[in-house]
Amino acid sequence: MPALVGSGDVMNQNAIFTECFSNPESEELYNDGWSDEPEVSVYYEIGFLCGGCNHYASFNENYGLCKNELSRHYLETIIKDFTCGEVSPVEFNAMQEQEKEGEG
């Protein structure tokens, strides 16, 4: 029998969201266009999106998991059109080049 956590008969459970943001604060950042973070907003505007990042594990055509241990969004479900300030433009462009080479 698995060990119970806390009181009563409630066991620890990991919930994986595949059709929405797992963190409402991240969803708010996205919906507000990173209004308090102009540098992240610029990344979004020039197309440094999570869907093109090596640290993104896709669940479906819209949502996936952030695998970047340096990101504040690590292990969150995010939309592919999300962005963060943890991947530099140089690193992002290198990822895109690797992906293109893999297709050819």
Image: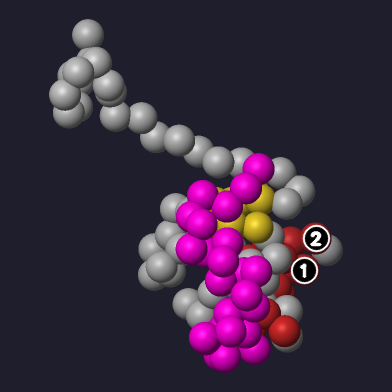
Asked whether the residues under the numbered discs 2 and 1 touch, taking CB atoms below 8 Å apart as contact, a structural biologist would say yes
Question: Residue 94 location, x and y as percent?
Answer: 63, 78
Name the residue tied to disc 2: 103
Q: Quadrant of the N terminus?
A: top left
From the top left corner, tell me how far across and down residue 26 is, in percent.
52, 64
Vertical side of 55 occupied by 58: above or below:
above
The residue labelled by disc 1 is 100
> Which amino acid lies under the numbered mark 1 shown in the image of this protein?
Lys
Q: Position of residue 27 (x, y in %)?
A: 58, 62
Comparing 7 with 54, the one in front is 7
Amino acid at pointer 2: Glu
- At 57% from the left edge and 91% from the top edge, which residue is drawn? 38
Q: From this viewpoint, is residue 86 visible?
A: yes
On screen, residue 95 versus residue 47, left or right, reads left
**Magenta span:** 19-42
* x 62%, y 75%: residue: 32
What is the quadrant of the C terminus in the image?
bottom right
Q: How many marks?
A: 2
Q: Residues within 10 Å of mark 2 (few under 14, many from 20)?
A: few
Q: Nearer the viewer, residue 93 or 61?
A: 61
Observer able to see residue 91: no
Q: Which mark is residue 90?
A: none
Q: Position of residue 77 (x, y in %)?
A: 54, 51
Q: Quadrant of residue 91?
A: bottom right
